[in-house]
C-alpha cells in the first residue's frame, strides 16, 4: 500500500483560530472567530433563522440592504459579533452563561448551523473569577449543558 502524504501548512493562521469557533451569550450576541467569518466570505450582515423542532440557529450571509438582516460588528481583532437579542426574546431561548457550539458547521447552502442541543458552557466561562461559586458542584460532569443549569 502506497502512502499518500500531504504537507500541513504552518504560520498563516494560529492553531487556536484555524477552525470554526462560535459562541453565544445570554444577551444574544453571537461571536465568531476570523476564520469562520472568512469561510462565510466576510458578509456585512446575516439573516438569522431558528429551527424550533431541532433547536438550531442558522446564520445566512446577506447584505445590509436586505430586510431583517442583522449587522456585523467587530468584536476583537480576531473576530466579529452579531447582536441577535430579538432571537433570544422571540423564541424564549434561556442561556445561563455564554455557550460554545462545538459542532458548528457551514452547510452546502452557505448557512452557518448552530445546534443548541449540543452547545455547552466552556471551561473558560466556568473558571472565570466571577463564576467560580456558581459551578462548585463536584459531582457534575466536566461539560455543563445549558438545559442542566436551568434546573
Image (cartoon, rainbow, N blue to C red):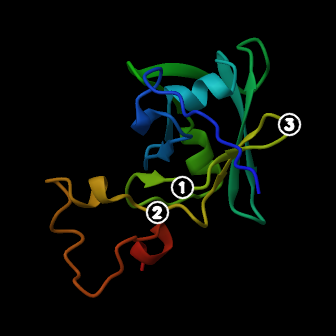
What is the secondary structure assignment of the residue under circle 3? loop
**Residue appearing at x 60%, y 60% in the figure:** 116
Q: 112 and 6: which one is in front?
A: 6
Position of 112 relative to 64 (above/below): below
CA–CA distance between discs 1 and 2?
A: 8 Å
The mark nearer the N terminus, 1 or 3, is 1
The mark nearer the N terminus, 3 or 2, is 3
For mark 3, what is the residue?
109
What is the secondary structure assignment of the residue under circle 1? loop
| Label number found at residue 120 | 2
Q: 69 and 57: which one is in front?
A: 57
Q: 9 and 13: which one is in front?
A: 9
- Hey, which quadrant is residue 42 in on the image? top right
Number of marks in the image? 3
**Residue appearing at x 42%, y 80% in the figure:** 151
Q: Do labels 3 and 2 touch, CB within 8 Å?
A: no
- Is 132 positioned to the left or the right of 43 in the image? left
Amino acid at each position: 500500500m502506497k502512502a499518500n502524504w500531504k504537507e500541513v501548512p504552518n504560520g498563516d493562521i494560529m492553531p487556536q483560530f484555524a477552525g470554526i469557533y462560535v459562541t453565544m451569550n445570554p444577551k444574544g450576541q453571537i461571536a465568531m472567530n476570523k476564520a469562520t467569518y472568512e469561510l462565510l466570505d466576510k458578509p456585512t450582515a446575516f439573516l438569522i433563522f431558528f429551527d424550533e423542532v431541532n433547536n438550531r440557529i442558522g446564520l445566512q450571509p446577506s447584505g445590509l440592504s436586505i430586510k431583517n438582516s442583522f449587522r456585523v460588528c467587530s468584536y476583537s481583532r480576531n473576530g466579529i459579533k452579531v447582536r441577535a437579542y430579538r432571537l433570544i426574546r422571540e423564541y424564549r431561548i434561556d442561556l445561563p452563561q455564554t455557550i460554545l457550539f462545538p459542532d458548528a458547521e457551514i452547510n452546502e447552502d452557505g448557512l452557518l448551523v448552530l445546534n443548541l442541543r449540543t452547545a455547552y458552557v466552556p471551561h473558560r466561562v466556568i473558571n472565570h473569577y466571577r463564576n467560580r461559586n456558581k459551578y462548585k458542584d463536584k459531582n457534575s460532569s466536566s461539560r455543563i449543558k445549558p438545559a442542566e443549569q436551568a434546573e
